Image: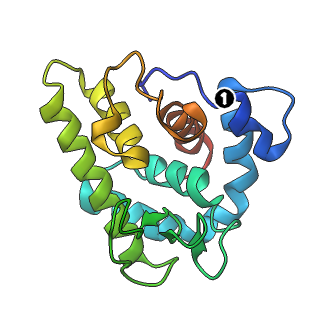
């Protein structure tokens, strides 16, 4: 809740044809996904507890990556390069992960959360002077594009999808924490 965020870029907000961007757009998109998100709430809460990751953050990634499953084709997204609610990258030229579990399973959510935790650790090691909040935001950006593309905090999203990935996810997480039961 204490992580600074600018929210969604104009490009990301156009997914929903919003006439505005920033935190307000992220909150609107999170709210749009809230009904679909409810069927995953207990799984997300369990996985968050297991890995020490706020369930609202997991819900926010689910919202950003797959719109709570709404954009997936039999569990696949990103032209069949990513799998599941949190879009684990299975492309050998990308993340190269092997999909675990059904696309909407707790096993999938565990795998994706393990990847997120891995990247948070990588960012912590790469930038030891960063605060906990900065490290978390950098880890979220790295989840989208790899830690090699996180070059500084002031440009944390420069190379992410939409140029706003961590900022949008953080804003959605703040909405889910306040309104979504996570």
Q: Residue 155: image x %, image y %?
A: 42, 20
Which quadrant holds residue 47?
Answer: bottom left
Which quadrant holds residue 95?
Answer: bottom left
One can see residue 81 in this view: yes
Q: Is residue 128 above or below residue 81?
A: above
Residue farthest to the front, as pictured:
93
* Left-right relation of 109 to 67: left
Q: Nearer the viewer, residue 110 or 178?
A: 110
Which quadrant holds residue 113?
Answer: bottom left
Q: Nearer the viewer, residue 129 or 54?
A: 129
* Left-right relation of 31 to 63: right
How many numbered marks have been drawn onto this rendered protein structure?
A: 1
Q: Residue 7: image x %, image y %?
A: 60, 28
Q: Nearer the viewer, residue 95 or 124?
A: 95
Tell me which residue sits at (60%, 53%) in the image: 63
Q: Secondary structure at mark 1?
A: loop
Q: Quadrant of the N terminus?
A: top left
One can see residue 182 in this view: no
Q: Residue 4: image x %, image y %?
A: 46, 20
Q: Is residue 5 above or below residue 162?
A: above
- The type of colouring in the image is rainbow
Mark 1 crowd level (few <14, some 14–19, many ≥20, 10 Å Cα): many
Tell me which residue sits at (40%, 74%) in the image: 108
Tell me which residue sits at (35%, 42%) in the image: 142
Q: Where does label 1 land, which residue?
A: 9
Tell me which residue sits at (64%, 68%) in the image: 69
* Left-right relation of 49 to 165: left
Q: Nearer the viewer, residue 155 or 138?
A: 155
């Amino acid at each position: 809740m204490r992580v600074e965020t600018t929210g969604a870029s104009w490009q990301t907000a156009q997914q929903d044809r919003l006439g505005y961007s920033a935190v307000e757009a992220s909150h609107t998109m999170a709210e749009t996904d809230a009904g679909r998100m409810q069927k995953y709430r207990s799984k997300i809460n369990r996985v968050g507890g297991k890995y020490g990751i706020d369930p609202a953050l997991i819900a926010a990634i689910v919202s950003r990556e797959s719109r709570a499953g709404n954009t997936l084709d039999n569990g696949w997204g990103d032209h069949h390069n990513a799998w599941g609610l949190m879009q684990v990258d299975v492309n050998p030229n990308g993340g190269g992960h092997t999909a675990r579990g059904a696309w909407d399973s707790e096993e999938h959510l565990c795998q994706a959360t393990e990847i997120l935790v891995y990247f948070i650790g990588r960012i912590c090691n790469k930038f030891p002077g960063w605060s906990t909040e900065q490290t978390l935001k950098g880890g979220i950006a790295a989840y989208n594009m790899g830690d090699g593309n996180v070059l500084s905090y002031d440009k944390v999203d420069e190379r992410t999808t939409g140029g706003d990935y961590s900022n949008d996810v953080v804003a959605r997480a703040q909405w889910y924490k306040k309104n979504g039961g996570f």
